Image: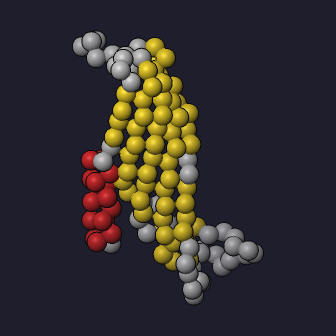
Amino acid sequence: MKTTFKGLALASLIGSIVVTSARADDPLVGLYFKGDAGGNWTESTELREFFGPVSPGSRVEFNPGPRFGVTAGYDVLEFLGLEAQLGIYENEISSISGATSLNAWLVNVPFMANARLHLPTYYR
């Protein structure tokens, strides 16, 4: 568990350093892009059914995994931006109660549409 936590902390630190951002010429209104990377940790989950009934108390355990995200947005006003975010979260399944052989992954691909309110830099 200690090694897993250290690996997750290191992946999160690297992900926070690898953040990129690009903006159009006008810093107040325009198109922008952002990318990020890091780690994610999915908690163990109760298994209720898997191609039929399973024994009570069955659990699915996950290993920590990588996380990547991209954002594209447009500042329509100096205080209002509209953006779309897409991410990929991946975890290897380490164990399933009652399973003898296992080679499985959980992959999430969340999508969000956001409205972002912000104060321009000249408002101190």
Residue at 58% in and 67% down = 46
User: Which quadrant would residue 121 be assigned to in this image?
Assistant: top left
Q: Which of 51 and 75 is in front in this view?
A: 75
Res 79 → quadrant: top left
- Identify the image's colour scheme: rainbow, by chain, secondary structure or one colour: secondary structure
Q: Where is residue 107 in the image (x, y as percent from the top left)?
A: 55, 60
Instruction: Farthest residue to the bottom: give it.
Output: 100
* Image height of 113 relative to 49, above or below: above
Give x and y (percent) for residue 88: 50, 53
- For the point 43% across and 69% down, the residue is 63
Camera sees residue 55: yes
Classify 98 as above or below 36.
below
As drawn, 73 above or below 50: above
Q: Residue farthest to the left? A: 124
Tally the numbered discs: 0
**Quadrant that contains the N terminus:** bottom left
Give 49 or 29, whichever is nearer the viewer: 29
Residue 116 in view of the camera: no
Q: Quadrant of the C terminus?
A: top left
Name which residue lies at 28% across and 54% down: 14
Query: How far across and down, in percent of the image, does residue 84 sit?
Result: 53, 35
**Residue found farthest to the front:** 25
Q: Residue at x 56, y 43 (%)?
A: 111
Horizontal and vertical percent position of residue 42: 47, 61
